[in-house]
Image: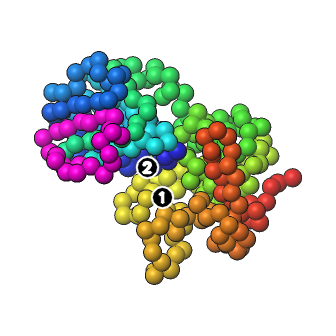
Amino acid sequence: MPEGDTIFRAARTLDRALAGKTVVLFESMLPALDRLEVTGRTIDRVSTAGKHLLMHFSGDLVLRTHMRMNGSWHIYRRGEKWQRPRRDMRVVIATEEFEAVGFSIPDAELIAARDLRRHDDLRKLGPDLLASTFDGEEALRRLRERGETAISDALLNQRIVAGIGNVYKSEVLFLCRVNPFTAVQALDPAQLESIVETARRLLRVNVSEGLAPMTTYTGFRRTTRRDDPTQRLWVYGRARQPCRRCGTPISLSKQGSDARLTYWCGACQKLQP
Ligand SMILES: [Zn+2]
């Protein structure tokens, strides 16, 4: 499941390349996107709402996409070779200069901009960690409403707070020294507050310029190769490797049908009685 900052970065890249430009070609493999003419419209801007990417066109039209597990947006110069096979293409939006290609996107629709606010998925989103208007109190209130839920599940629930995926879930709970399987109601207000604040801080740092994507751990030695994303994380993707704080091997649990992965250190993140 992609994280909110990944979608935010994708939207920013698309916005920089496409905003103010005219669509000269629109092609889609998704029948849902066939019913309206997009060619000839101007791309006003590209934004996000939680993990939804919203491409706003002139004439009150928005393309909403959600990446789910495997979707991604790429941007290419016209004629440049794609990095994924053509069969994975779901939608192409071309301007004179660029081609935005949505690969393996399972969830996409064209909707009138005026209907966005009433859109079921968007309306039910919790406070967006990356929004400038983020409402921390509301996020905490929604968390407390799910008292019996394990904190690791609550953080993935986009209706409680929007933007966290598997990676930040594990990283945030490690940084806050909270066991992922603790029920929300067993956490005190200060702990919940620090979880929400840490999540917001990590996501915001990761949409600032100049940092490799998805970095929570920067204690690496100068000589360490940084290409490997797990070199930049505390626990995620590090099962059985020593905890960076205490040396205990990192634990891994896979839950649920969508194989939600949880990484944690059993010593630094003891289950509270
Ligand atoms: Zn540890």
Name which residue lies at 59% across and 59% down: 236
Q: Give residue 145's position: percent from left, percent from top.
A: 71, 33
Mark 2–mark 1 contact, CB under 8 Å? Answer: yes
Q: Which residue is labeled 1 in the image?
A: 214
Above-or-below relation of 105 to 242: above
Label 1: which secondary element: loop
167 or 188, which lies in front?
Answer: 167
- How many numbered discs? 2
Q: Give residue 223's position: percent from left, percent from top.
A: 45, 81
Q: Give residue 75's position: percent from left, percent from top.
A: 27, 47
174 or 131, which lies in front?
Answer: 174
Q: Is residue 38 visible?
A: yes
Label 2: which secondary element: helix
Above-or-below relation of 52 to 120: below
Q: Is residue 163 left or right of residue 235?
A: left
Q: Which residue is labeled 2 in the image?
A: 6
Residue 231 lies within the magenta run: no
Name which residue lies at 19% across and 44% down: 98
Examine the image and state in which quarter residue 268 appears.
bottom right
Q: Is residue 133 visible?
A: no
In the image, is the residue at mark 2 within 8 Å of ligand 1 by its beta carbon?
A: no
Name which residue lies at 55% across and 47% down: 165
Protein image colouring: rainbow
Which mark is first along the chain, 1 or 2? 2
Residue 81 lies within the magenta run: yes
Please give the range of residues in magenta: 76-97
Q: Is residue 56 left or right of residue 216?
A: left
Circle 1: residue type = Met
Above-or-below relation of 42 to 60: below
Name which residue lies at 87% across and 52% down: 273
Circle 2: residue type = Thr
Q: Give residue 39's position: percent from left, percent from top.
A: 18, 27
